[in-house]
Amino acid sequence: MTTATGKARFGVVNFPGSNCEKDTLYVIEKVLKAEVDEIWHKETSLKGIDVLVLPGGFSYGDYLRCGSIAKFSPIMKPVIEFAQNGGVVIGICNGFQVLLESGLLPGALISNSSCKFICKDIFVKVERNDTPATRGIEKGAVLKIPIAHHDGNYFCDEKTLETLKANNQIVLRYCDENGNVNQEANPNGSISNIAGICNRQRNIFGLMPHPERNAEKILGNADGLAIFEALAECRTFDS
């Protein structure tokens, strides 16, 4: 849709237990200077939204499994319809877990191999730059982005992994600061160092790192802003 800013109009879903929605809203509105709506989980429509963000946090207290209750929220029906019709959806951390639980992306996120909550800066390598969230970022670029999770260990069976590789659906991989993808740079045990994946059509993207937490230079690192800047151009995204 056409907005006064000329950028995509964002929507950020707020589930009970979300705790990163305000950070995400701030980055979009105050840093990116784009239009954004906060969407309560009981809403049943997504009118006028170009890009939808499922933020990080602990939706419904992470009871049962992370994201497993959120998938039953009223808002998820229009979210799924929006995504299946080509709408751009990004799930960050808990939002990634919700996308997996809803079947919009394959695989699962299980407990970190260390069995500990991890909160620190890590490095990710951009494996493809033709998705809505990575356009404009050089392929092979290394981004420094924070993580904060206990259940961020991406897992899937061998067949699914081969499909992800064959269809080039792995968007981000954990790496060291020089871009080397190895086990030493893997903070949570994720299979194939996976930090973020997309669907085959590229309009649905889930990642564990938090780009909204390092989108301003005053924080010492603004690598995360590149992802939001790419998303802001999604009105013209061709899937």
Image (cartoon, rainbow, N blue to C red):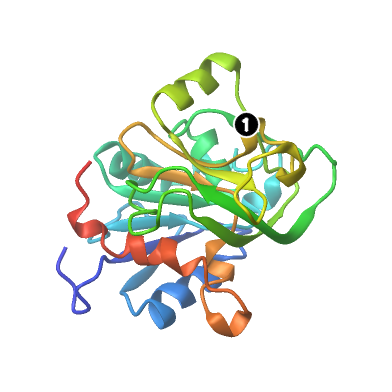
Task: Provide residue 132's location: percent of width, then percent of height.
Answer: 33, 51
Q: Outermost residue toward the right?
A: 115
Q: Amino acid at mark 1?
A: Ser
Question: Is residue 39 visible to the viewer in this orientation of the structure?
Answer: no
For the point 71% across and 43% down, which residue is it?
A: 186
Q: Label 1 neighbourhood size at 10 Å, few (<14), some (14-19), many (20+)?
A: some
- Which of the image's four quarters has the C terminus? top left
As drawn, is 91 to the left or to the right of 152? left
The quarter holding residue 167 reads top left
Task: Provide residue 145's location: percent of width, then percent of height.
Answer: 60, 61
As drawn, is 124 to the left or to the right of 130? right
Between residue 1 and residue 72, name the one nearer to us: 1
Query: Which structural element holds mark 1?
Result: helix
Task: Provide residue 43's location: percent of width, then percent of height.
Answer: 39, 56
Task: Provide residue 219's location: percent of width, then percent of height.
Answer: 62, 80
For the point 58% across and 85% down, which residue is it?
A: 218
Q: Is residue 108 above or below residue 232?
A: above
- Which of the image's four quarters has the N terminus? bottom left
Q: Is residue 6 above or below residue 193?
A: below
Q: Outermost residue toward the bottom?
A: 218
The quarter holding residue 96 reads top right
Q: Outermost residue toward the left?
A: 2
For disc 1, the marked residue is 192
